[in-house]
Amino acid sequence: EMKLYKTVMQTTMKEQMKSIVLWVHPTTSFPIFLAWMHCVYSNSLHYVPVYFILGIIIILVENYQTFAMNRNTNAGFIPITIPEMLKALILGGPNSSYIQPISIMPQAEIAKSLTKSEDELDQAALTDQVLDGAGIRMDGDHLEFPFSEA
């Protein structure tokens, strides 16, 4: 399992570097390019750790916008807000309650189907509808990791 994680991390890092170099996501590539040019202009590597941390923060914010804020990819979950994260980071402690529990808001199509009586509900169709709304495609009985058929 650790070999799998290592392979996934290496592949992810290679894809991230390619997307930065090829300007796939300009909101990530442009600040990295500016940081690189500033280091070249000042002829110093003193700013590299600062720019490295800022680059990681930019990537995390971009991932938050892509996966948490996008209704098609978050499966109806209400994401943790940035003010909640900042309060938990700055003021949080072992028994703090700055982050609210995750709640689910059903999507409009699912909410309409939930208003039917239980006799009219087809559980398999409802499950397929929920998974399709979340962007998950199940092409077989894959209920355990690592999706083995054995």
Image (spheres, grey):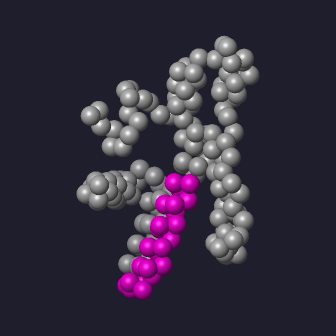
Foreground pick, 78 / 24: 78
- Magenta stretch contains residue 62: yes
Left or right: residue 78 compared with residue 9: right
Above or below 148: residue 103: below
Left or right: residue 48 compared with residue 107: left
- Residue 21: in sight, yes or no? no
Residue 135 in percent (x, y) is at 50, 34
Residue 116 in percent (x, y) is at 72, 18
Foreground pick, 121 / 42: 121
* Quadrant that contains the C terminus: top left
For residue 147, what is the image quadrant? top left
Which residue shows up at 42% across the image and 29% down it?
138
- Magenta stretch contains residue 54: yes
Residue 144 in percent (x, y) is at 38, 40
Which residue shows up at 54% across the image and 48% down it?
66
Foreground pick, 149 / 12: 149
- What is the number of callouts on the image? 0
Q: Which residues make up the magenta segment?
A: 42-64
For residue 137, what is the image quadrant? top left
Q: Main secondary structure of the magenta part?
A: helix
Left or right: residue 123 compared with residue 143: right
- Residue 104: in sight, yes or no? yes
* Quadrant that contains the N terminus: bottom left
**Which residue extends farthest top?**
120
For residue 146, what is the image quadrant? top left
Residue 46 in percent (x, y) is at 42, 86
Which residue shows up at 41% across the image and 36% down it?
143
Which residue shows up at 30% across the image and 37% down it?
148
